[in-house]
Image (cartoon, rainbow, N blue to C red):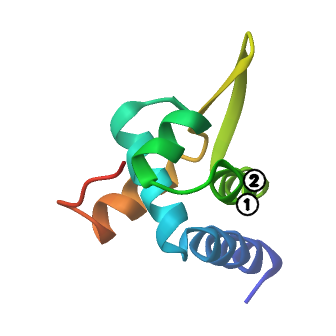
């Protein structure tokens, strides 16, 4: 395996690890359906504490899966990695997000 192949495999493995939690997978699925969303909306839909949702969003941001955009006092999240659309569509073709 050459260095470029290894980097591609490593990048894909990191993406899958970040998606490997039910809450993060649900957040990503919901963002794919809504285009963008803030933590408050996600927290209410997922029925989880804001701190829990924020921790999962931070992991998704670190993995480059979501990006944040400030809009006044509110931060909206969107999908940043196009590969996520294909992965989630394959894994959860009929499932709903938040």
For the point 73% across and 50% down, the residue is: 61
Kindly state the secondary structure of the residue where label 1 is placed: helix
Residue 36's place in the image compared with 2, above or below, is above
For the point 68% across and 38% down, the residue is: 67
Question: Which of the pair 8/37 is nearer the observer?
Answer: 37
Picture disc at residue 16: none
Q: Position of residue 7 (x, y in %)?
A: 76, 73
Whether tag 2 and tag 1 are in contact, CB under 8 A, the answer is yes
Q: Position of residue 96 (x, y in %)?
A: 26, 54
Label 2 CA crowd tier, 10 Å (few <14, some 14–19, many 20+): some
* Image side of residue 36 versus residue 53, left or right: left
Residue 24's place in the image compared with 53, above or below, is below
For the point 69% across and 73% down, the residue is: 14
Kindly state the secondary structure of the residue where label 2 is placed: helix
Spot the residue most to the top: 72
For the point 40% across and 46% down, the residue is: 45
Question: Which of the pair 23/28 is nearer the observer?
Answer: 23
Q: Position of residue 93 (x, y in %)?
A: 21, 62
Picture disc at residue 59: 1
Give the alpha-carbon distance from disc 2 to disc 1, as whole Å.
Answer: 4 Å
Residue at numbered disc 2: 58
Give the quarter of the image for residue 95: bottom left
């Amino acid at each position: 395996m050459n260095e470029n192949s290894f980097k591609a495999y490593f990048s894909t493995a990191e993406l899958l690890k970040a998606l490997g939690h039910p809450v993060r997978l649900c957040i990503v699925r919901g963002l794919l359906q809504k285009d963008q969303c803030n933590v408050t909306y996600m927290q209410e839909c997922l029925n989880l504490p804001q701190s829990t949702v924020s921790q999962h969003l931070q992991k998704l941001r670190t993995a480059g899966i979501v990006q944040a955009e400030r809009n006044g006092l509110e931060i909206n999240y969107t999908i940043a990695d196009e590969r996520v659309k294909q992965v989630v569509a394959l894994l959860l073709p009929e499932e709903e997000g938040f």
